[in-house]
């Protein structure tokens, strides 16, 4: 039976599903993505319209997490794991924002203003996005579940 398995690569993520504390988990990424060229990314997994996502613990046990219960996911090795996002956003301006979640927590970061000409404002990006949105904070990358977001505030530079 193992002859028919597609080899997948283990990727570390930190998953937050309030009221629980952030929890280190693993996901397994396919060498071929379904919606773009190259390898699958964590955002590909979290943006699939499935109710539950398999998240693995260090001991190999699996937890099926309800996708909509997850507030945010921090991706380890983001430039390697979310390579397609970084390739797509190269040369694209970004905007500093504060994302406020339904449990009262918030993350400050930057949203890449990816979109067609004339639709590259923060409001355009968050209204166009579905599921999990990329949010950069320094070298860190978060996948933010927009269904758990109460507000996005544009912050001043500096």
Image (cartoon, rainbow, N blue to C red):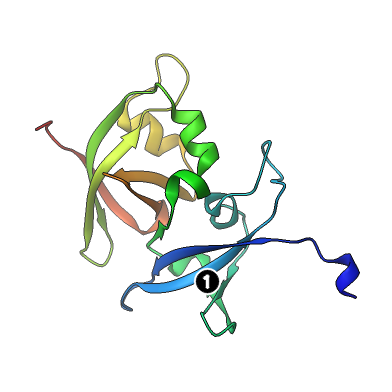
- Up the image or down, 63 lies above or below 46; here it is below
The residue located at (40%, 14%) in the rendering is 118
Residue indicated by mark 1:
66
Q: Assign the C terminus to one quadrant of the image.
A: top left
Q: Is residue 106 left or right of residue 146?
A: left
Residue at the image point whose x is 48% and y is 64% from the top: 12
Along the line of sight, which residue is nearer the eye, 80 or 145? 80
Where is residue 96? Give x, y as percent: 22, 36
Count of numbered tags = 1
Of 116 and 40, the residue lying toward us? 40
- Percent position of residue 95, x then y: 26, 31
Looking at the image, which residue sits at the far left?
Answer: 158
| Among the 4 quarters of the image, the one containing residue 150 | bottom left
Q: Is residue 139 left or right of residue 14?
A: left
Vertical placement of residue 136 versus 23, above or below:
above
Residue 103 as seen in the image, left or right of residue 77 = left
Identify the residue shown where x is 41% and y is 60%: 73
Q: Position of residue 154 (x, y in %)?
A: 19, 36
Above/below status of 147 relative to 22: above
x and y percentages locating residue 49 in the rendered image = 62, 56
Q: In which quarter of the image is the N terminus?
A: bottom right
| Residue found 50% across the figure and 29% down from its top | 88
Q: In which quarter of the image is residue 105?
A: bottom left
Kind of element beneath mark 1: strand
Question: Furthest-top residue in view?
Answer: 117
Image-quadrant location for residue 4 = bottom right
Q: Mark 1 packing: few (<14 Cα in 10 Å), some, or many (20+)?
A: few
């Amino acid at each position: 039976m193992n002859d028919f398995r597609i080899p997948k690569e283990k990727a570390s993520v930190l998953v937050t599903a309030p009221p629980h504390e952030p929890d280190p988990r693993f996901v397994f990424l396919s060498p071929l993505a379904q919606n773009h060229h190259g390898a699958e990314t964590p955002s590909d997994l979290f943006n699939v319209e499935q109710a539950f996502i398999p998240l693995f613990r260090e001991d190999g046990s699996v937890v099926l997490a309800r996708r909509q219960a997850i507030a945010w996911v921090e991706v380890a090795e983001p430039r390697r794991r979310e390579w397609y996002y970084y390739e797509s956003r190269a040369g694209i301006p970004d905007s500093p924002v504060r994302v406020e979640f339904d449990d009262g927590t918030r993350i400050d970061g930057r949203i890449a203003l990816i979109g067609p000409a004339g639709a590259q404002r923060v409001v355009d990006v968050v209204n166009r996005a579905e599921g999990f949105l990329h949010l950069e904070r320094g070298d860190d990358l978060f996948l933010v579940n927009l269904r758990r977001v109460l507000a996005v505030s544009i912050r001043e530079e500096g």
